[in-house]
Image (cartoon, grey):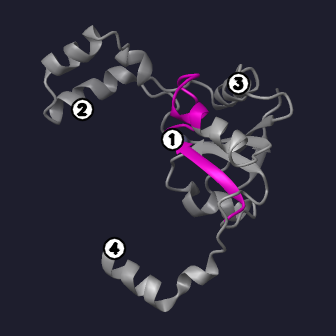
Amino acid sequence: MLEFNRWFVEQGHHDLYPNSKLPEKKIAVLTCMDTRLVELLPAALNFKNGDIKIIKNAGGIISHPFGSVMRSLLIAIYSLNVEDILVISHYGCSVQGMDASKLMPKILERGITQERIDFVKSCGVDLENWLKGFNCVEESVRETVSAIKNHPLIPANVNAYGFIMDPETGRLDPVRE
Ligand SMILES: [Zn+2]
């Protein structure tokens, strides 16, 4: 990776990627970390370097109203002039139907002791709920859009829209409220 990076810089390939800290299109995208969307999502929506802010996590969700995703969105709005937020989930998401009880044996298998798990739980963390996936992708997108729109620190003139992308074709389906 580092070898490639040296070559990339030496060749001046960065010139192909226009630079701007402020998003040209005044859009922030919240989406899933799915590998299939890495290049497909921006390509399918004609987003180039410098156009948008992009926030990714497992499922493209907001798991806490004062967690890192909302924090990033607030910074995008108040520091970086974002006016529209697009929540883009996708069909066939691994987070859909994810069952925390199935993750627990894998966590133990990797050498995390039951004592440590119990310690985390004793600190008040509802691990099962925290690691749980969503059941319905449309419902998840609606909930996320609603969490943004109804957040006490989101200004009224910032809009949020929900979509689901087909990770094979890049087709974008709007999610009606
Ligand atoms: Zn996903």
Q: Which residue does the image show at 70% across and 24% down from the upper left?
A: 153
Q: Where is residue 142 in the image (x, y as percent from the top left)?
A: 72, 26
Give the quadrant of residue 156: top right
- Nearer to us of marks 2 and 3 is 3
Q: Residue 15 carries which label?
A: none
User: How far apart are labels 3 and 1 at the CA level?
Assistant: 21 Å
For the magenta stretch, what is the residue range?
50-71
User: How far apart are labels 2 and 3 at the CA level?
Assistant: 38 Å
Q: Residue 57 carries which label?
A: 1
Residue at the spot of label 2: 106
Residue at the spot of label 4: 1
Q: In which quarter of the image is the N terminus?
A: bottom left
Q: In this view, does 16 lie above or below 147?
A: below
In reply to whether residue 42 is colored magenta, the answer given is no
Q: Is residue 3 above or below residue 111?
A: below
- Nearer to us of marks 1 and 2 is 1
Question: Which is nearer the N-term, disc 4 or disc 2?
Answer: 4
Q: CB atoms at circles 3 and 1 under 8 Å apart?
A: no
Q: How many labels were placed on the picture?
A: 4
Q: Where is residue 86 in the image (x, y as percent from the top left)?
A: 73, 42
User: How far apart are labels 3 and 4 at the CA level?
Assistant: 40 Å
Residue at the spot of label 3: 153
Element under label 4? loop
What is the three-letter code of the residue carrying label 2? Lys
Question: Which is nearer the N-term, disc 2 or disc 3?
Answer: 2
Give the quadrant of residue 164: top right
Q: Which residue does the image show at 67% across and 44% down from the upper left?
A: 76
